[in-house]
Image (cartoon, helix red, strand yellow):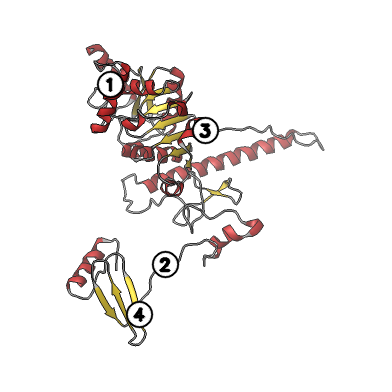
């Protein structure tokens, strides 16, 4: 037997166990039935054995929207020509939605004016343990969804007013001109290595409407369940299908990447040298380049490994949990600044647009060589700073140098 929160329920169960009323069988439970005596015997993996004359089977059936007893949920996906959604392959029993909570139609395209939210959707469950004044993920999710709904209503109102105005000036019998179609492509981010920082960056970007593709060692189904809304692709196509690629693997892994896979790509170096494996990889890279006195920054070492890529150092001086929690709207005077170091201005600008999109203020601090100030233990590595504070700290470091 097992139980979850609230805590007092666990205390009650432990008291019943100590009194001999409840027995915990542990993992790998096997139950056998003796038809002659009418008794059931349960054996746990730890050796616990219980015999009783009653068995309550509380296992839940496999979830399925198509077989749901809720007619509304069932008809959303089984309505034939009137079906508006489809069941999530990564999360069976739920209605598939994209990163902006728009319902994915039977044809695989997001419904532009139909949203769904809650436990019966494929979104990552984030509602548990929310408390007032904690800026919990579910509250941020609700705020983002409310903004989308308000923007949609505003666009609808503007379109209706414009159509009414056009009708009022048309000559009798003259058909209204068709509007010129316009295609707007959203920013595309690639994440290589969806670990802690990679997953946090993916979720932050998805919540801000950025298309995200991830490449990692986990199976596609596991990544889809952990990062709903992100596309799973191979590392070899990540750069060619995205505007910016964030390398969020350990530094020693980054220094062994295949250069051809990142040709022409704008690459975020979010790595830091931690531990013996990274130290050994850095030493080997320095030896290969003849940098015996250690003058090159770790991002310069990565740029040398990926000579056809445009490397930008950023996001290595912010905690992974802060990537999700510290983003603020443009214009907020307390918006957190993120330092950006690059040798290519266009690459720095592209990464700056991404940082702006996910709620941060990009501050360019110079070249990749000057990016040494962003490495662990250096002057710009830690602490929350606004744009003005970070710029002032940078000027002080230059003056001291």
| Residue 25 picture location, percent across and down | 26, 69
Q: Report the front residue among 22 and 75.
A: 22
Q: Which residue is mark 4?
A: 33
| Residue 127 picture location, percent across and down | 38, 52
Q: CA distance from mark 3 to mark 4?
A: 57 Å
Q: Which residue is mark 1?
A: 373
Element at label 3: helix
Element at label 1: helix
Q: CA distance from mark 3 to mark 1?
A: 31 Å
Q: Earlier in the sequence, mark 3 or mark 1?
A: 3
Q: CA distance from mark 3 to mark 2?
A: 41 Å
Against 189, residue 366 (above or below) is above
Disc number lying in front (3 or 1): 3
- The residue shown at (30%, 35%) is 319
The answer to the question of whether label 4 and label 2 lie on touching residues, with beta carbons closer than 8 A, is no
Q: CA distance from mark 1 to mark 4?
A: 69 Å
Disc number lying in front (4 or 2): 4
Element at label 4: strand
Quadrant (top left, top right, bottom left, bottom right) of the C terminus:
top left
Q: Which residue is mark 3?
A: 241
Q: Earlier in the sequence, mark 4 or mark 2?
A: 4
| Residue 151 picture location, percent across and down | 53, 40
Residue 243: mark = none
Q: Earlier in the sequence, mark 3 or mark 2?
A: 2
User: Could you classify mark 3 by the number of other residues whose Cα lies within 10 Å: few (under 14), some (14-19), or many (20 or more)?
Assistant: some
Describe residue 389's horizontal placement relative to residue 20 as left or right: right
Determine the image quadrant of residue 78: bottom right
Q: Earlier in the sequence, mark 1 or mark 2?
A: 2
Against 93, residue 303 (above or below) is above
Q: Which residue is mark 2?
A: 60
User: Could you classify mark 4 by the number of other residues whose Cα lies within 10 Å: few (under 14), some (14-19), or many (20 or more)?
Assistant: some
Describe residue 159's horizontal placement relative to residue 349 as left or right: right
């Amino acid at each position: 037997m097992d139980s979850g929160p609230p805590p007092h329920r666990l205390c009650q169960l432990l008291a019943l166990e100590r009194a001999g009323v409840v027995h915990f069988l542990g993992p790998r439970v096997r139950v056998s039935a003796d038809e002659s005596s009418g008794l059931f015997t349960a054996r746990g993996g730890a050796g616990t054995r219980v015999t009783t004359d009653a068995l309550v089977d509380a296992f839940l059936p496999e979830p399925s929207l198509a077989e749901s007893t809720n007619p509304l949920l069932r008809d959303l996906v089984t309505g034939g020509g009137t079906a508006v959604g489809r069941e999530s392959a990564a999360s069976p029993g739920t209605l598939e939605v994209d990163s902006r909570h728009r319902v994915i139609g039977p044809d695989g395209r997001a419904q532009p004016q139909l949203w769904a939210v809650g436990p019966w959707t494929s979104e990552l469950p984030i509602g548990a343990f929310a408390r007032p004044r904690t800026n919990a993920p579910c509250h941020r999710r609700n705020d983002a969804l409310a903004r989308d709904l308000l923007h949609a209503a505003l666009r609808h109102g503007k379109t209706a007013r414009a159509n009414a105005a056009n009708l009022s000036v048309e000559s009798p019998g003259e058909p209204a001109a068709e509007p010129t179609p316009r295609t707007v492509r959203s920013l595309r981010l690639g994440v290589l290595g969806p670990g802690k920082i990679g997953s946090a960056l993916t979720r932050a970007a998805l919540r801000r409407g950025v298309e995200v593709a991830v490449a990692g060692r986990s199976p596609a189904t596991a990544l889809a369940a952990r990062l709903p809304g992100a596309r799973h692709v191979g590392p070899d196509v990540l750069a060619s299908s995205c505007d910016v690629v964030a390398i969020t693997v350990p530094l020693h892994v980054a220094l062994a990447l295949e250069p051809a896979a990142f040709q022409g790509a704008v690459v975020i170096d979010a790595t830091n040298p931690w531990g013996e494996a990274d130290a050994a990889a850095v030493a080997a890279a320095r030896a290969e380049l003849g940098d015996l006195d250690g003058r090159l920054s770790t991002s310069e070492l990565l740029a040398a490994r990926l000579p056809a890529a445009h490397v930008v150092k950023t996001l290595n001086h912010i905690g992974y949990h802060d990537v999700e929690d510290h983003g603020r709207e443009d214009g907020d005077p307390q918006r957190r600044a993120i330092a950006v170091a690059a040798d290519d201005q266009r690459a720095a600008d592209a990464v700056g647009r991404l940082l702006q999109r996910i709620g941060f203020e990009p501050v360019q601090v110079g070249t990749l060589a000057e990016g040494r100030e962003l490495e662990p233990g250096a002057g710009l590595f830690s602490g929350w700073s606004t744009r003005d504070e970070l710029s002032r700290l940078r000027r002080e470091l230059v003056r001291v140098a």
